[in-house]
Structure formats: C-alpha cells, structure tokens
Image: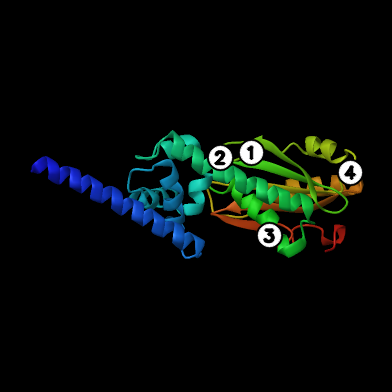
Amino acid sequence: MGQGTTIMSAKTDLSFHSGHRERLKEKFLADKLVDYELLELLLSFAIPRRDVRPLARLLASRFGGVYYVFTADVKDLMAVPGVGRSAAILIKLVHRLMSINHMKAMQENAVFLNGNKSVIDFCRLKLAGLEHEEVHVLYLNSDFCVIEHEVHSHGSIESSNVHIEQILKRALSDGIRSVILMHNHPSTDNTFSQDDVVMTTELEMLLNKCGITLYDHYVVAGGIVHSMRAKNLLNKSSFSN
C-alpha cells in the first residue's frame, strides 16, 4: 500500500510539472511571462525532471536580477546549488546569441540610429555584472557601422589599462572612420573618473589629428550605461549626428 502511494505520488508530481511547463510555454507565446518565469522556462530545458522555479528565483536573487544571471561566469553559475554544467552552458549560450544579435545590428545599421540603443545594449550585455574591469573598443566605418569589436584589456576590480597607441594604430587601418570606447566599474556606482576623462581627451585629440572621430566613451556602473558625450565631456565639434 505504501509503495503504491509513493508510485502514485511520483506520477502525480511528474504530471504536475509537465502541465506547469506547458502552461509556461503557452504564457511565453502569449508574451505574459515575468522575468523569473522566463528563466524558469529556460532552465526547464536543461533540468527536465525537477521543479526549477525555486532555482530561477535563487539565481535572480544571487546575481541581483535575471539580466545579471546571463552575464555571470560559468564557474559562478555552477557554484549555485542546483545549477549543473548543462544549465550553466545553456545560460551562457543564450548570452552569446544575444551578443551576436546586437553585433549584427551594429554592423548593419549606423550606431547613432534609435538613440544608440544597439550600442548601449551591447555595452551592458558585455560588461554589466563582471567582477573585474574590462576595456572594449568598437571600430566603425564611414557609414558609422561597426566593423570590428576588440576586447582591449582585462584589469582588476579597481582598474584596467588603456593603451592609446594600440587603439590609434588599429584605428589607422583602412576603412576606420570612428571609434567607440567602453569599460565598466564593478566596484562602484560612480560614472567617469578624472583619469577616464583625461585619458579619453588625449585619445580624442590624437584620433582627431588623423581625421578619425572618437564617437563616444561608455561606462557601465551599477548596471547603468553612461555616455561621456551625453555628459558634455567630449568635443562635440568633432562629430555631429
């Protein structure tokens, strides 16, 4: 009797989870899922025989929001109880596909269209949630479409190096018309530091002498993307939308 009850209970649980996941899929198709439910649905494909709702909530809480789950490192994801290798890889796979999508948009459309949304999304996608500073550079052609993305340097939680000569050398290659700089501040919510402004001003002057525009410098701090141009910290006469 006891054994039969256990078997029946297991079948009931399986039926419940199967029905719940089908309801999640229907809600997804109807665009009615909230953030953690989207993550829950994604996890269900990597963890098929377990209720993953608590895990989705745990991940969102651990990393400060669903968005930052995708920017987390694989090892940090796998450090969360219940997240195995397959689930971590699936999460990072989605993150990689999102990056490809934003890059494609920047390659096919001028970056200043739609209020720079594609660049800002790409910047947040690449840099938000990192535990160390990184500097990235985008090189644009005469149509202000991105033709190359470069991870310029990796740093510590407090700082990273910018090699102006290296950026200038690459910018002098055929077809480069403009440059976008981006980095993050993982240890503070502050925007541009004085060192950021001094370095950017020097780079902008050198690029301008070569007929190349420093389109903007973005920093991701506290999950927010800040624009140096929008803060009137760049020479606006060097470029006009």
The residues tagged by marks 1 and 2 sit, at their Cα atoms, a distance apart of 8 Å
Rounded to the nearest whole Å, what is the CA distance between mark 4 and mark 3?
24 Å
Sequence-earlier tag: 4 or 3: 3
Q: Decide which of tag 4 and tag 1 comes sooner along the chain.
A: 1
Check disc 2 and report the residue beneath it.
Answer: 132
Front one among 92 and 220:
92
- Circles 4 and 1, Cβ within 8 Å, touching? The answer is no
Q: Which residue is mark 4?
A: 175
* Residue at the image position 70 percent from the left and 54 percent from the top: 119
What secondary structure is marked by label 2? loop
Q: Which residue is mark 1?
A: 160
Rendered location of residue 180, percent (x, y)? 75, 49
Mark 1 vs mark 3: give the one in front: 3
Label 1 or label 3, whichever comes before in sequence order: 3
Callout 4, which amino acid? Gly
| Mark earlier in primary sequence (1, 2) | 2
Kindly identify the amino acid type of the residue bearing the numbered disc 3: Lys
> Cα distance, mark 4 to mark 1?
28 Å
Name the kind of residue labelled 2 in the image: His
**Residue 201, position in %: x, y?**
78, 50
Q: Residues within 10 Å of mark 4 (few under 14, many from 20)?
A: few
Q: Relative to the observer, which residue lies in front, 226 or 177?
A: 177
* 2 and 3 marks in contact (CB < 8 Å): no
